[in-house]
Amino acid sequence: DDKTARDLLGEQFKRRLLMDGQYCNVRFICTQCDDCEPSEVMTDHEDVAKEVEGRWERMNELRDQILKLENQETESSISIELEDLRTEMIEVTQDVQDLETQI
């Protein structure tokens, strides 16, 4: 987000960009090696997720199911179902990130 980008820039570099009129031209590229927490993506990109009908609701359902399973006693079948839900959550999160790049 913009706050992270501002924090990454040094004060002298920011001043030079402002003086040259290039401050708005700086972009940060995030790669797939970045560690994205699904809950952060949901919070930061709620507006994008809501652009696809039913996507936001499905993300909330998956989050609730994951939380419910995490609170239950761990059994092998629960662990498998939990992993499946996490995988689906990552896929849904990736869809939202893909939509964000298209906008």
Image (tube, grey):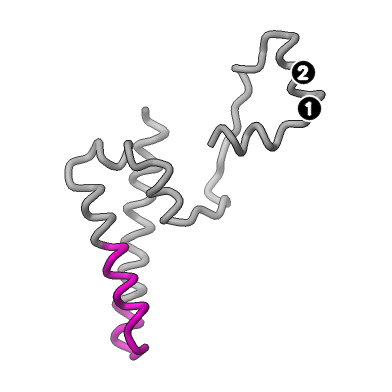
Residue at image x 35%, y 44%? 96
Quarter occupied by residue 25: top right
The residue stretch that appears in magenta: 62-81
Image mark for residue 15: 2
Estimate how packed mark 1 is, as few (under 14), some (14 to 19) or many (20 or more) residues with alpha carbons within 10 Å.
few
Q: Is residue 26 left or right of residue 58?
A: right
Pointers 2 and 1 in contact (C-beta within 8 Å): yes
Residue 31 is a magenta residue:
no
Estimate how packed mark 2 is, as few (under 14), some (14 to 19) or many (20 or more) residues with alpha carbons within 10 Å.
few
| Magenta region, main secondary structure | helix
Where is residue 80 shown, x and y percent of the image?
33, 80
**Identity of the amino acid at label 2?**
Arg
Circle 1 residue: 11
Where is residue 35 shown, x and y percent of the image?
55, 55
Looking at the picture, tell me which residue is in the foreground, 41 or 43: 43
User: Extreme right residue here?
Assistant: 12
